[in-house]
């Protein structure tokens, strides 16, 4: 089992091991529990992920998957519905705007932001100026729209060229642009993985937290854990794990422990489960 490279990370792991019934294990989905694939619709949980979560979940306060995907889609792609041992699992979709609870099997969500429909109508016209159809393409998440450049002849150049126009389009309709690994997501403001994580920590009264992620959207969750760790009134020790680091060094630089990708994350979760009573 990997050893955290920082004092704060080691303290977070020690707290989880000492009082697992009060620990929250929170994880991103794409790139953390599932490998990054060219077509996001083909993403599935890494082999062994569900079994590792099922072994870990009964021993901690809760396991949470925090993702930019719709909660229902993440549940389906992860294959976690109806799995024995996952009663304490929640999926916080759309950066926490949606919530699926394993106990009820239902999704709770507020009304959609009206700006998403307006952007959906205008987006094809904006993208038409940036390459052939299929090279730059849109993933419709219902409450958000993600523009992918991974298939472009020069993915990074396309990503950089689109940031300005998509930022202007989003701003006109009250949305923000969230950059990721060769993807730009246009979504409503006011909710991110950090907000969702902090709220859930406080809701369940967690006294320690592990968070694992792989992308720029996970930086907000990293910041939330760092703030929780230094809260003078109610400090919550935490462990930050980076799943891979080649594309997002900003995350690896702030992690307490860097793992090579979803396969290594799954192995770590299984080893953690084995160490807990």
Image (cartoon, rainbow, N blue to C red):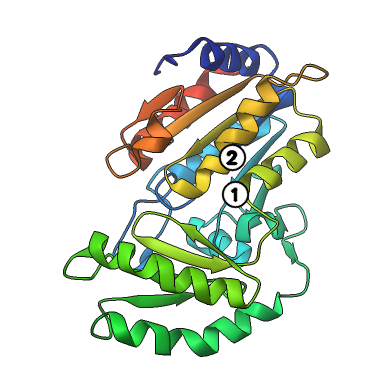
Residue 203 x/y as whole percent: 82, 39
Residue occupied by mark 1: 66
User: Visible in this render: residue 255?
Assistant: yes
Residue 245 x/y as whole percent: 32, 37
What residue appears at the point 59 percent right and 17 percent down from the top-left corner? 12
- 10 Å neighbourhood of mark 2: few (<14), some, or many (≥20)? many
Res 133 quadrant in image? bottom left
- 10 Å neighbourhood of mark 1: few (<14), some, or many (≥20)? many
What residue appears at the point 35 percent right and 30 percent down from the top-left corner? 259
Task: Tell me the number on the disc at residue 30.
Answer: none
In the depicted view, which residue is nearer to us: 264 or 115?
115
What residue appears at the point 27 percent right and 81 percent down from the top-left corner? 134
Q: Are marks 1 and 2 in contact (CB under 8 Å)?
A: yes
- Decide which of tag 1 and tag 2 comes sooner along the chain: 1
State whether residue 200 is above or below residue 19: below
Residue 233 x/y as whole percent: 83, 18
Res 109 quadrant in image? bottom right
The nearer-to-camera label among 1 and 2 is: 2
Residue occupied by mark 2: 221
In the depicted view, which residue is nearer to us: 153 or 25?
153
Mark 1 and mark 2: span between their CA atoms? 9 Å
The count of marks equals 2
């Amino acid at each position: 089992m990997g050893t955290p490279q920082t004092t704060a990370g080691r303290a977070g792991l020690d707290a989880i091991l000492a009082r697992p019934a009060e620990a929250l294990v929170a994880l991103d989905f794409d790139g953390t529990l599932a490998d990054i694939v060219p077509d996001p619709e083909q993403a599935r949980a890494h082999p062994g992920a569900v079994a590792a979560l099922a072994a870990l979940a009964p021993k901690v306060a809760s396991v949470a998957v925090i993702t930019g995907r719709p909660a229902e889609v993440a549940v389906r792609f992860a294959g976690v519905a109806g799995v024995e041992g996952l009663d304490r699992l929640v999926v916080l979709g759309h950066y926490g705007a949606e919530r699926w609870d394993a106990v009820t099997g239902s999704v709770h969500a507020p009304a959609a932001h009206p700006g998403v429909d307006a952007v959906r109508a205008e987006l094809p016209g904006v993208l038409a100026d940036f390459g052939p159809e299929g090279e730059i393409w849109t993933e419709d998440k219902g409450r958000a729209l993600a523009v992918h450049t991974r298939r472009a002849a020069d993915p990074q150049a396309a990503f950089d060229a689109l940031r300005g126009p998509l930022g202007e389009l989003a701003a006109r309709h009250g949305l923000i642009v969230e950059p990721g690994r060769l993807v730009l997501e246009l979504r409503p403001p006011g909710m991110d993985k950090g907000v969702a994580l902090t709220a859930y920590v406080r809701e369940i009264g967690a006294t320690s937290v592990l968070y694992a992620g792989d992308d720029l959207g996970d930086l907000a969750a990293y910041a939330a854990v760092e703030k929780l760790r230094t809260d003078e009134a109610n400090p919550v020790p935490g462990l930050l794990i980076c799943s891979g680091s080649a594309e997002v060094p900003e995350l690896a630089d702030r992690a307490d422990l860097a793992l090579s990708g979803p396969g290594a994350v799954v192995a770590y979760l299984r080893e953690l489960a084995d160490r807990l009573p």
